[in-house]
């Protein structure tokens, strides 16, 4: 039995936290697992409930770890993390996210932790900061890679970015392990699950529901979505409704933009009525949303592997997305959905209209999407692959002693 410390930015609704918690839970069946988590932002939804199925995971809160950069907090967080690692004396430290990857890997290296692993669920090398600061981030990540025993990339395209484009480390140091989801969760009782969503949000049977899922933050580029909404409703006679699932600091800005565009909208937690655009805030039963929607879209500027698109595929929904991160690996263009160049409003709207007005095309693409996700993105396969990596590294470390 190994002692494993897994570090996570914050325990909130999102793909990376869910994946990390599930990994900690899976490993806790055979190892002593500690999960170190930072403090969430005010506009984020606490997701501590995700830990309920995994009572063996020992959770430690490092409240000084925040998403934003603050020298005082970050220095205190570093020493707090270092003290925790000194007490635990882990065999493996596995960091997830930029801030834990920085503080955790330095602390682990200073304490000579035998195995240090970092997973890039995404990266912040572009579209998050200005060019100067982005270059600093890349240089820091190159340094941190020297302290890492292994880097986990969650897609082949991400490995290419890390090794060939940004030169973070040599490709030999990178292990590609595809993300996985619980496909059965989205495929069981689809009709009943979807009806719960459609009834709650007052959707009529003849209305086509289009949804975007994720944090309402700049990198998700929701303003492109609003431009597409405007262009689409001007060109179709089919009754359509649009859903922004998630929340964040830019929600009020989006609402003001819709006001300027003269598009009716509603923040459903406060006012339960039908509108062209519905802000749902966070939805915990995401399988209901995916089964209730007819089309799922993504407008991001930067992504790792977009969990929302995996979930859409598991629910047999066609997808349209900007070309970001591993989107080209998740979507088979023109087969399971459409891939659009970033900010091409006309092309995005054109493809969306094709799906809105062609039920057979929606079903054909959705069914192909399900088959692709079921084959490639199994949660069990992901967990087994990481466990196998741990075992190989632990065995190699033992042979060196």
Image (cartoon, rainbow, N blue to C red):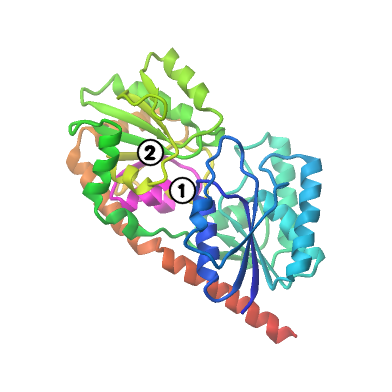
Observer able to see residue 337 = no
Q: Is residue 144 visible?
A: yes
Neighbour class for label 1 at 10 Å: few (<14), some, many (≥20)? many
Q: Which residue is at the front of the view, 52 or 146?
A: 52
Distance, label 2 to label 1, CA atoms, is: 11 Å
Give the quadrant of the C terminus.
bottom right
SS for callout 2: strand
Is 70 in the magenta? no
Q: Is residue 58 left or right of residue 341?
A: right
Q: Position of residue 43 (x, y in %)?
A: 56, 35
Q: Disc 1 designates what residue? A: 306
Q: Is residue 352 left or right of residue 377?
A: left
Residue drawn at (36%, 17%), measured in percent from left and top? 263
Q: Which residues are magenta?
A: 308-332
| Residue at (76, 50) in percent of width and height | 77
Q: Is residue 281 left or right of residue 316?
A: right
Quadrant the N terminus occupies: bottom right
User: Residue 162, position in %: x, y?
Assistant: 61, 55
Q: Position of residue 93 (x, y in %)?
A: 68, 65
**Could you say whether the residue bearing mark 1 is in a helix, strand or loop?**
loop
Disc assigned to residue 297: 2
**Residue depicted at 72% across the width and 42% down the height:** 135
Total number of numbered labels? 2
Q: Quadrant of residue 292?
A: top left
Assess whether residue 329 is covered by the magenta stretch: yes
Residue neighbourhood size for the residue with mark 2, other residues' Cα within 10 Å, grouped as few (<14), some (14–19), many (≥20): many
Residue 202's place in the image compared with 115, above or below, is above
Q: Residue at x 48, y 23 (%)?
A: 254
Q: Circles 2 and 1: CB distance less than 8 Å?
A: no
Where is residue 337 shown, x and y percent of the image?
32, 44
């Amino acid at each position: 039995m190994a002692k494993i410390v897994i570090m996570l930015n914050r325990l909130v609704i999102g793909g990376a936290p869910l994946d990390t918690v599930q990994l900690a839970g899976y490993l806790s069946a055979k190892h002593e697992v500690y999960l170190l988590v930072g403090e969430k932002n005010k506009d984020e939804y606490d997701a501590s409930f995700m830990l309920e199925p995994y009572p063996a995971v020992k959770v430690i809160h490092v409240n000084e770890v925040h998403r934003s950069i603050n020298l005082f907090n970050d220095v205190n967080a570093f020493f707090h993390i270092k003290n925790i690692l000194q007490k635990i004396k882990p065999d493996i430290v596995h960091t997830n996210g930029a801030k834990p990857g920085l503080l955790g890997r330095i602390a682990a290296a200073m304490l000579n932790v035998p195995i240090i692993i970092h997973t890039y669920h995404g990266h912040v090398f572009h579209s998050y900061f200005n060019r100067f600061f982005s270059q600093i981030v890349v240089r820091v990540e190159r340094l941190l890679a020297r302290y890492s025993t292994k880097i986990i990339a969650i897609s082949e395209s991400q490995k290419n970015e890390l090794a060939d484009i940004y030169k973070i480390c040599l490709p030999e140091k990178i292990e590609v392990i595809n993300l996985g989801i619980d496909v059965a969760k989205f495929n069981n009782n689809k009709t009943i699950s979807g009806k719960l969503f459609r009834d709650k949000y007052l959707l009529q049977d003849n209305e086509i529901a289009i949804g975007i899922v994720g944090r309402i933050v700049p990198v998700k580029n929701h303003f492109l979505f609003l431009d597409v909404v405007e262009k689409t409703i001007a060109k179709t006679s089919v009754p359509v409704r649009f859903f922004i699932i998630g929340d964040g600091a830019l929600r009020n800005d989006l609402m003001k933009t819709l006001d300027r565009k003269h598009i009716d909208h509603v923040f459903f937690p406060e006012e339960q009525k039908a509108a062209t655009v519905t802000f749902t805030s966070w939805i915990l039963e995401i399988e209901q949303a995916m089964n209730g929607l007819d089309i799922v879209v993504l407008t991001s500027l930067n992504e790792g592997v977009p969990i929302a698109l995996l979930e859409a595929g598991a629910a047999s929904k066609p997808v349209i997305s900007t070309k970001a991160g591993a989107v080209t690996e998740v979507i088979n263009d023109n087969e399971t959905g459409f891939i659009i160049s970033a900010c091409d409003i006309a092309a995005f709207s054109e493809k969306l209209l094709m799906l809105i007005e062609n039920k057979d095309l929606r079903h054909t693409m959705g069914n192909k999407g399900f088959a692709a996700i079921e084959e490639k993105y199994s949660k069990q396969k992901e967990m087994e692959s990481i466990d196998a990596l741990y075992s190989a590294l632990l065995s190699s470390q033992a042979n060196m002693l």
